Image: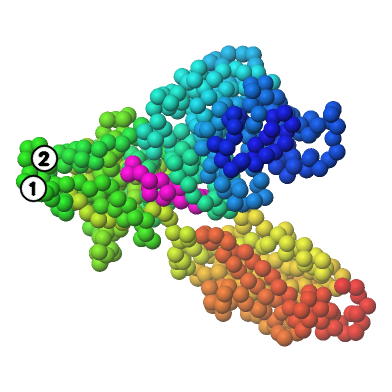
Amino acid sequence: MWLLRTSTGELEHFNSPDDVKGGYAILSHVWQQPEMSFQELQALRAQPSSSQDTLLARASSKIRECCRLAASHGYQWLWIDTCCIDRSSSAELSEAVNSMFAWYSRAHVCYAYLYDVPTSGSLHRRASAFRTSRWFTRGWTLQELIAPRNLVFMSQDWTMIGTKASLASLLEEITGIDADVLTFRRSVADVSVARRMWWASTRKTTRIEDEAYSLMGLFGVHMPTIYGEGARAFPRLQEEILKRTSDQTLFAWGNVLPVRTSPLRERITFSNFHHDSHLFAPSPAAFCNSANMTTIPVHVAFKNALTTLGIHPNELEGAPKAKGKATDKQSPYSIPLPDYTVTTAGVRSRMLVLESSKGDLAVAIAVLAVRDESTGSGVGLLLRRRRYKESKLKYPRYHIGVSVRGMREWLSLRYRMAQVEWAAHALSFGESAIAAAWKQLYISHRAASRKPARPPSAATHAAFRFVFPRWLPVELRKVGFEPDVPLPMMRTDADKLSGGGSLQRFTFTHGATGEAFRIQIGQCGGSPWATANIIPGAASHPDDATGPAAVVPATPQPSVNWKHGFDCGKNGVDAWPNGTKTFGDSNRSVQLTFTRMNEGATHLLDIRLGGPCSTAIGYIRDLKEAYFGSAAKAVPP
């Protein structure tokens, strides 16, 4: 680690915090622009200095003030993240991110600098500057608050306004972090995973990957930092946590099914591509309702579930039998500790599963060793699977959660957990029996990277939309072509072709020669079609209701007459190889290409002009020579 010498501002490298004689101070703050980087501070060393113009004097005001404060408190060394990490080295950055919690916890003192909090004013007052400081909203400052044993809050003018220990109760109100954790009367490792995630649920980070990286120290895990992986970082963090703990509150996020609700009796929907359908949460924000999820012994959760359903342990399918003879004080079954294996099919585990079915749909509750302290009830994952589709699998594969629809189509809520005490009601449907089994299963842990391709449907065609790339009119204008109407280039501008034969027509005319080409896009029989016509002297062929002006003989096209119908099968977009088709002949052509932009029906329409010459200029020159002879050469393109 690099440390600043507080007397000079020079950087010096140490192999570990233990090598720093006399200890070091550390700064926690919210970044402001501009911040001085490692390279900028090192560059100051190469500049000539004097006794009045030292390196420290030329450093940023934040570095100067913090060095002076630490030096006044007797510390020779100081660590500041902005200038003590060489971010040009990915290895050094990864080491720093993985060591951050340890560096803060080993510091002799941590200065929490609140640039937006004045020295005067009550800290406890409702909506005070202290309560609303940005420092309490950032992702990285969570571990920077918890890790140090000695943390001092500094106001915007570097005046001390309190310590973590003296303000523990107020800090609990602001952050939700238990005061006994802040004062080290309770280890952070003794707090449930869900509650620790809840602490971070409203905090923000500049980089989405830091939602995960800023929490590694809080859970005692280490993993490579891969900036650029995006939202994949947080599920990867949960995989690492799963390797180190059997705390099932990691899965206890999302909404709990209300009591007296039975999914099999309701109007339910579900999607395997929704984030809630999988074991791992997409971000810390998913734990916003998980503050009261706590762990309980596995055997307590096990017994509670069986007692609720009135099932005798001997009737439990798949339960491992206890060794020796069962007594009143000894259970007739043994319960192994939870074990998880992350596979491509999902997370494989052995769990107590309560299941009921309705036709092909099976709904189950996988009992977790978790209690919701707000209700005092045990909690389980609300699972679902297709019985017939997966009947040949050795172990069943489940997804999580259902959406229960209300009286209106738009009124629906997603639920991914259920109260175990209400399992009998939640899984009831007619005469369908509830089966209880201790079984091996797979639970989907992340959504597929993309949805499987679906064949075009009438509904998709009915909503066919297209836009032009923003660069297209610019490039066409360079060679003289102007569209007759503004082109839709944003999704909000996308033209929607409804059934019944609506027609979109775009004519591109050369300003100097009057030459043109016309694009027509329509829909008939529920399918989109498109054509392109090359028009010599388009100005002499006025538009009419029966279709386009006369086309070049070498590029015959069917006449468009909406009164008598139009056979669009020949030009149906669905039949085009790779969504592209060329109209014209060997001398001049217009190529149309439709590319799907998203999962909906919006397409990007690209236009390429071609001919013997590979450039659009050559295309225009060929048109002039073909229709106007050598005299056209005198007309500038």
- Examine the rendered structure and indicate whether residue 572 appears above or below residue 307: below
Give the x, y percent position of residue 117.
63, 21
The secondary structure type at the circle numbered 1 is loop
First of labels 1, 2 by sequence position: 1
Residue 385 within the magenta-colored segment of the rendering: no
Q: What is the C-alpha distance between the residues marked 1 and 2?
A: 10 Å
Instruction: Give x and y (percent) for residue 552.
Output: 74, 82
Numbered label attached to residue 324: 1
Highlighted magenta segment, given as a residue range: 230-247
Frontmost residue, 397 versus 561: 397
Chief secondary structure of the magenta span?
Answer: helix
Relative horizontal placement of residue 494, taking residue 499 as reference (left or right): right
Q: Position of residue 605 (x, y in %)?
A: 64, 66
What is the x, y in percent for residue 207?
59, 45
Q: Nearer the viewer, mark 1 or mark 2?
A: 1
Residue drawn at x 75%, y 68% as measured from the top left: 508
Rendered residue at 38%/46% (across/down):
244
Q: Residues within 10 Å of mark 1 (few under 14, many from 20)?
A: few
Name the residue that disc number 2 marks: 330
Considering depth in this image, is 365 or 207 the residue closer to the camera? 207
Q: Residue at x 7, y 37 (%)?
A: 328
The amino acid marked with disc number 2 is Gln
Give me the residue at 85% from left, 38% from top.
48
Q: Are marks 1 and 2 in contact (CB under 8 Å)?
A: yes
